[in-house]
Image (cartoon, rainbow, N blue to C red):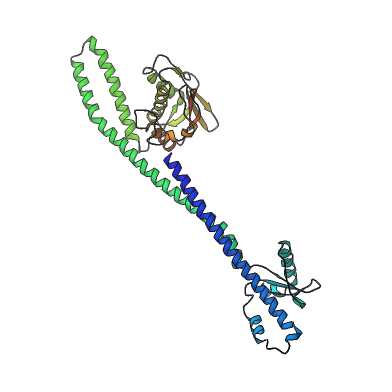
Amino acid sequence: MEKSRWKWYLAFTGLIIISASMVYTEYLAQQLASGEKSKVELYRRVQESLNDPNNLNKDVSMETELLNSDLLKGIPIIFVDETGRISDGANWGEVKDTNMVFLESQLKRIKASGREPIEGTGYAKYIYYEHTQLLRLLTYFPIVQVFLIIFFVLIGYSAFSSARKNEQNKIWVGMAKETAHQLGTPISAIMAWIEHLKLHSNKDTAEIIHELENDVFRLELIAERFSKIGSTPILTEENLTGILDRNKVYMARRASKRVVFDFPDASGKAFYSKVNGHLLDWVFENLIRNALDSMEGRGTISARIEETTKKLIVHLTDTGKGIPSKNWDMVFQPGFTTKKRGWGLGLSLSRRIIEAYHKGKIYVSHSQADKGTTFTIELPKA
């Protein structure tokens, strides 16, 4: 929740920066446009002063010098006489200034834009002008700036997320391997004690020793699973129906008698995918265990497999409490849990197993309060 709030804060701050930049750029563009119009107006007044018969005996050196200066530098101009014909052009380019076809096309474009001409006298009765290239670039700058900022933010966020995810992965991998290492010593000791008990066993203790051996085997399997996290697992072609069935059998023994398991028949249609059976067992165990916790000892856990041209899709559904839609993706984040006990790593590791090792997908496809939840796993077909 805190992470989501910070994202909104950053987005809002970025929006304010972009808006302020666009407003300021627009202000600069308006000031520059006003300056260009003032220069054209000044040019028109100088022309009128030079063409005024009353000024023939006056010193017009200042006006002439101003007219010959770079007053209109960079401002494309088209002069139109009283009849509507183009008299001359300026600042379009050495060749284009005298190219009437080109000037006609530019005149039509300027008129179509709705820009009113500045009225003068004589051969420059109407002075049409285009904005300078600097002003046009400044006009487009906010758009370019927005794209650059968005691009920078996306690259930065992607790099930050990637680095954070890699750091998290190293932590979980290290924790998993250390857990496997720590489990090794007590498992070896328990196995030695079991062998010692066998030497002094009788009919009453034989069954107990057998169950202890099963539990130790399970502990060894769990340790092996932890040791595989972070290393590239070996994938073999296996039947998903069979994997689901063996997990159902194992978990049903540890579930309440009031829980019904509706799974595909192990002898039914086979669906083959290249998987690591030990790791996939871990995923199904996690999902079934979460379903049992959600149903609190009563309900139905069902599984079904769909087949497409390239994928096998497994749906695992329970009739438990359900998951709020806002948490559908958060349940896969490390540390997220609604239980009083647990580290919140089960579904996070499940996603890593499915997506990183099997190139598949795992997600909550449906959930409704007090009606249940469906987890969906997509795996490539063998």
- Which residue ends up furthest to the right in the rendered image? 83
Q: Is residue 311 visible?
A: yes
Question: In the visual, does 136 lie left or right of 373?
Answer: right
Instruction: State the residue in front, 74 or 264.
Output: 74
Instruction: State the residue in front, 150 or 127.
Output: 127
Instruction: State the residue in front, 222 or 380.
Output: 222
Residue at 29% over, 33% down:
180
Residue at 72% over, 79% down:
48
Rendering coords of residue 160 (x, y %): 41, 48
The image quadrant of residue 348 is: top left
Q: Is residue 354 visible?
A: no
The image quadrant of residue 229 is: top left
Instruction: State the residue in front, 12 or 288.
Output: 12
In the rendered view, tell whether residue 141 sits above or below residue 235. Answer: below
In the rendered view, tell whether residue 293 sits above or below residue 331. Answer: above
- Which quarter of the rendering shows the N terminus? top left
Rendering coords of residue 244 (x, y %): 44, 23
Rendering coords of residue 94 (x, y %): 67, 76
